Image (cartoon, rainbow, N blue to C red):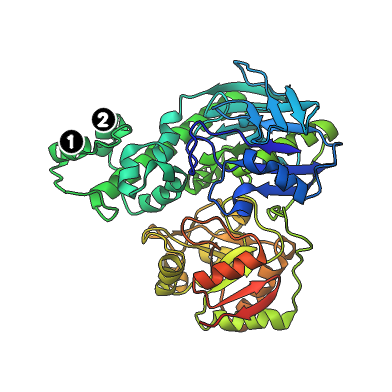
Amino acid sequence: MAVYGIQDRINSDTPFYVHDHAITLMDQGKVIKHLTLERQTRNKHDNQLYHHIYDLLKEEGLIAKREYDLVFVDNVVGRSFISSCGRFRFEGPLNDSLSTMPEKGRCWWLDQKQAAHGLNHELAHLGACLPFYGTFRENSLLIHFDGGGSLSNFSAWTFRNGQLKSLEFHWDLKYLSGFFNANALVFGVIGAKYKEQNSVPGKMMGLAAYGTYREEIESWLVKNEYFANIWGNTSVFFHEAKAQFGWSKAHLNQDDPLLQDVVATLQHIFLRDFLLKVEQLQKSTGADYLYYSGGSALNIVANTKLVESTLFKDVFIPPCPEDSGLSLGAASYMEWLKHGRIEKHGPYLSNWGLKANQTDYDQADIKMCADHLIQNKVIGICNGDGEIGPRALGNRSILALANSRQLADKVSRTHKKREWYRPVAPVMLERNAVYYSGQEKIHHLGRYMLLDFSIAKEKQSEIEGVVHVDGTARIQVIQRRQQNPYLFDLLTYLDECHGVKALINTSFNIKGEPIVNTTAGALKSARNMQLDGIVLNGKFKELQY
């Protein structure tokens, strides 16, 4: 059993330094149970596992069981997990280096002393690759990159001859990840308060596509230290922007061309400097493969450039590279050390509290959903177990036709209450991803919506609802039926019977709320969002208002 539940530095309803608490239970290399706390409590990025752990374990029948090994994941703010009830307590050793092995700590579990280990944040991120790709391949480079781990925000490792070796760990690239989670100017442009930091990266990447990199903006940003610390004093930016560019505005707005160029320039710097670092590491190690995790691995433009660089024979990124995957990564790493192998899983691992949640449908059910979709209806999907990670991949999704910009805008802004500049993503069969992108072979990271695909210009109008302003789309590619049988069958029927090659696929949640979890919760959210229909474990239900 792996636990990520480090207490935040600030006692607040909103996460600041620590977020996305989680628990994972594995056995013989297979995931048995996984909890991302926010899905259960319905509090976005919930970081208060220490309040809930007793009740959560009791509800799942895990209180009486003691035969599991325990591992706890740390954070830059500390290495101790102490429950509010006082019956669960773990203290990890304090070291100045990152160990490649779990470190024995002191643990009391339900009033009894029990053996337990701590695993550093960095390796837990990388361990999240194991349940999706199996054991690390020989001669691999492993990179973790996020806002802050245990002792670093960037770490690199090699895997050779069955051994993991640390190459480096440091905060040298903190300025890059800080663009997305700690930059006062970016927060001002986005219109976010600091407590909303976990939502800023996705918004910033969406807005960056509207702007253009400008060398003179980069020089100016560097000179002013990226305006990173002008919290509560944005007048500094207004003064400098007027002096440098003659820019005279009273507010920071997302539709301003200069501000769009500023955000695009920050994204460009991130891409360039990060890719240069990866290239240097590949040249110094001669690594054939790259395993990459941490919150920065959700930057799909960077991921796409990594794949296209051909620096490596292959690139592996988990569908949960951010902190919601830490407990899974720690459990997987321990199981890998213990057994020497890990089973390969799909992304539908969020099953805590979902009893016998099986999807059952026939062709008539598929036809009913398809018939509503082709009438421009917006449909919620809640099938089986939920996805782990931030991307909805068909089991907790909202679907609609992808051929209309107006319909896409309705889905995003009316139903989900999102910002105008944020795109929605498509889902399609692999053959249709080939058709729209012109690529002969679709990389496997497309299964998890982790890549950008350039859409052929002459075909963009066919799916204009999901093509971003820069001509790209973040496609979820369904390569095989076993990946998601319901979604595969629905897409196949729409393609063969109606010539519909793609659907909008966006997460089943409204702004500020976690992705839906239970069927009851999904039905409630669907009504609140005014969706036209919902599929619950394969069965379609039309919603009337």
Task: Provide the secondary structure element on which disc 1 rests.
Answer: helix
- Graded by Cα atoms within 10 Å as few (under 14), some (14 to 19) or many (20 or more), the crowding at tag 1 reads some
Seen at 79% across and 63% down, the residue is: 356
Seen at 75% across and 64% down, the residue is: 357
Q: Relative to 161, does residue 421 appear above or below in the rendering?
A: below
**N-term-proximal mark, 1 vs 2:** 2
Percent across and percent down for residue 272 are 42, 36
**188 with respect to 485 (left or right):** left
* Residue at the disc numbered 1: 240
The numbered dot on residue 224 is 2
Which residue type carries mark 1?
A: Glu
Seen at 68% across and 79% down, the residue is: 366
Q: Are marks 1 and 2 in contact (CB under 8 Å)?
A: yes
The extreme top residue here reads: 96
Q: Relative to 220, does residue 379 appear above or below in the rendering?
A: below
Q: CA distance from mark 1 to mark 2?
A: 9 Å
**494 with respect to 153 (left or right):** right
Percent across and percent down for residue 306 are 53, 42
Name the image quarter holding the N terminus. Answer: top right
Which residue type carries mark 2?
A: Asn
In front of the other: 286 or 328: 328
For residue 339, what is the image quadrant?
Answer: top right
Quick check: can you spot residue 389?
Answer: yes
**220 with respect to 413 (left or right):** left
- Graded by Cα atoms within 10 Å as few (under 14), some (14 to 19) or many (20 or more), the crowding at tag 2 reads some
In front of the other: 354 or 333: 354
Percent across and percent down for residue 483 are 71, 60
